[in-house]
Amino acid sequence: MFKKKHSLHFLKCLYATLKIFVYKFPMTVFSPNHGYCKELCTTTLLHCNFQNTSLRSIASAFMYFLMERNFKYAKNFSLVKVQTTIALSKLIGEGLIKEPAYLRLALGSINRYATSLLSSRLSSTMAQALITEIEALVERLTNVLKDSTEILLVSTDPYTRVDIYYRLAESYINVPDLRVTWLDNLAEFHRKQKAYAEAAQCTIHIAALITEYLNIQEPSPGIPTGCNSFQTVSRSALEEASLVDVAIDDGSCNSGPFTETGLLEVMDKAIGFLKRAKLYETANEMYKLLIPIYEKNRDYAKLADCHGDLQTIYDQIILVSESSSRLFECYYRVGFYGPDFEELNGKEFIYKEPPLTKLGEITESLTHIFNKKHPNIDLKIITNSADVNPKELNPTGNYLQITAVKPYFEAWELKERVTAYDKNYNINQFIFETPFSKDGKSHAESIANQYKRKTILRTRTAFPYIKKRIEVINKQTIEVQPIENALELIEQRTESLMAELKVSSPNIKTLQPVLQGAVRVSVNAGPLDIAKSFLGNPAKYDSRQIENLRMSLEKFLDICGEALQLNKELTSRDQWEFHLELEEGYLKMKEEMLLLINAQQAPSSGNTGSKPPD
């Protein structure tokens, strides 16, 4: 009835009727198994924020009455306290309370009702206890309103807005209902931003929290044993383990999600987000947690749905694996330097951005966000990736340093992370490289003098997470010698060519640029230049490094030959001349390189008699 628009007179009569109903049937209204209290709190709070003074007064008086009646019925009003805070948090998250000035006035009225009316209705001891609890609740709601104002102020900055949602969820770590509410608000915000992986992580956290509660109450077969069960889908799910230290009082964890039915709904919602994020492998892992519950309940209709969906998921995994058509996110290191960045000043973060996001795009986006918040302040971009010494910067200036980074794995990790998905999920180490030479220039004139510095960054937790930016907590720098740098360049080009050869449906549009960069003799610091610089002067270098370089170059030549043959098979008549250029460059490079690789071996004549396709 409240969902429809009514006249003020009708609403007055409705509130009067509801007051009688609450007075006569408190067991029904305050039962945690029904949603009446939740609905009443939500609607009454909305009316408490109305501009009409009369309606606002009626609504605030009814809200006070709910608190007092709940207190008399249960000797506390925990249910109303929790449901009121949840309702306000939801209303703010959904953007239904944008200007809370009138709601603040209503909260003040509730405080006054408590001090003026209680002495005549309750004993002095009970009255004082209720006054204390009402004051604490009003203070909590006032703080939530302050947070809502802060959210409105950063409406153009999605990263800071997510930080506020996250901080609010963290502040209620000991109040499970409210933590779930703000995690759900955060999931909805991510959904609107089309950040489905992050929305899924929020929902997985909620599921982990619910399972912790259910196992504390009464462990049940089929139900995941706690947040530890969710490690396969979210490393950060362990954050919800703190529930074991929470004293769950009356009114807490009695809302819908904290039931087996609620858990099933949340897990199903998470799977939906994962599929939209194209994280099919993670969706498969979620089903491993969901299916045992349906098996326990012998819900064969749901099991049929699950297995039918799993078949579709497996088909998608096969498709994206064979075609390499799935694009994964890009990552950037962003450093903040300047007083106007406030708490971000001096910190570095890894930002997770949509696939194919270019450096210029994220730079423009972050610049736009900053200029919206500080329109009269000049922002400077640090274009190099070298370490920043804040003491060398203008103390009143504001600087952003943005650097593209890639996921980084130790050698032992790469043995386990085989697929593209493996290399883009649960990642918390990133790397970027900075070329330098001993004469102070970034790029040396010769590859034999080209050094590089590897910077490995570790974040506080792994991506994907419930946030799209995570603070860097550790930095490691490794200096790479010229011959090691050369060896890595060869290995990288070999891996790029092998990736093109492994694709089930080869694409000449992606193959040719990689092949061109490998076999064109004119390419600076190319494979032939590397061979001449190091194999031509082997005495200068460690014999093991020279041997490794020889073996890498031999493998590189073999893979180039295979890639060239594939290009020949894919080349149409109008591109045949370009293929011949690539073939000629390869044969020249191979002839000179083999002389350097093995001086005793006669140069290979190769096959130069290619015929154009019919």
Image: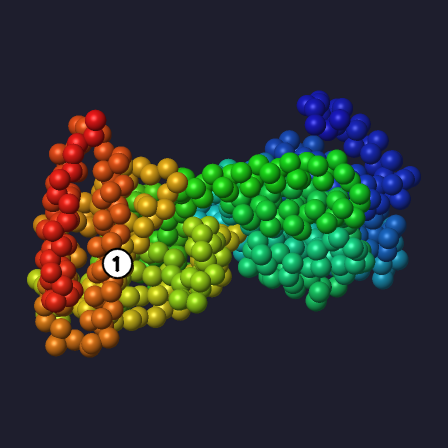
Which quadrant of the figure has residue 61?
top right
Q: Is 533 displayed left or right of 269 in the figure?
A: left
Q: Is residue 52 above or below residue 394?
A: above
Local secondary structure at mark 1: helix
Along the viewing direction, whichever of 470 and 294 lies nearer the viewer = 294
The amino acid sitting under disc 1 is: Lys
Whether residue 87 appears in this view of the structure is: no
**Which residue does the image show at 46% across and 58% down from the upper left?**
417
The image position of residue 225, as x and y in percent, is 71, 59
Q: Which residue is mark 1?
A: 555
Neighbor class of circle 1 (other Cα within 10 Å; few <14, some 14-19, many 20+) is: some
Q: Is residue 610 above or below residue 135?
A: above
Q: Is 419 displayed left or right of 214 in the figure?
A: left
Which quadrant of the figure has residue 11?
top right
**Which residue does the image show at 32% across and 50% down from the upper left?**
498
The image position of residue 157, as x and y in percent, is 42, 45
Q: Is 7 displayed left or right of 20 in the figure?
A: left
Along the viewing direction, whichever of 294 and 199 lies nearer the viewer = 294
Whether residue 582 appears in this view of the structure is: yes
**Which residue does the image show at 26% across and 46% down from the upper left?**
563
Q: Is 137 displayed left or right of 324 in the figure?
A: right
Quarter of the image with the N terminus in it: top right
Q: Identify the colour scheme used.
A: rainbow
Q: Is residue 610 above or below residue 208?
A: above
Quarter of the image with the C terminus in it: top left
**Which residue does the image show at 79% across and 58% down from the upper left?**
219
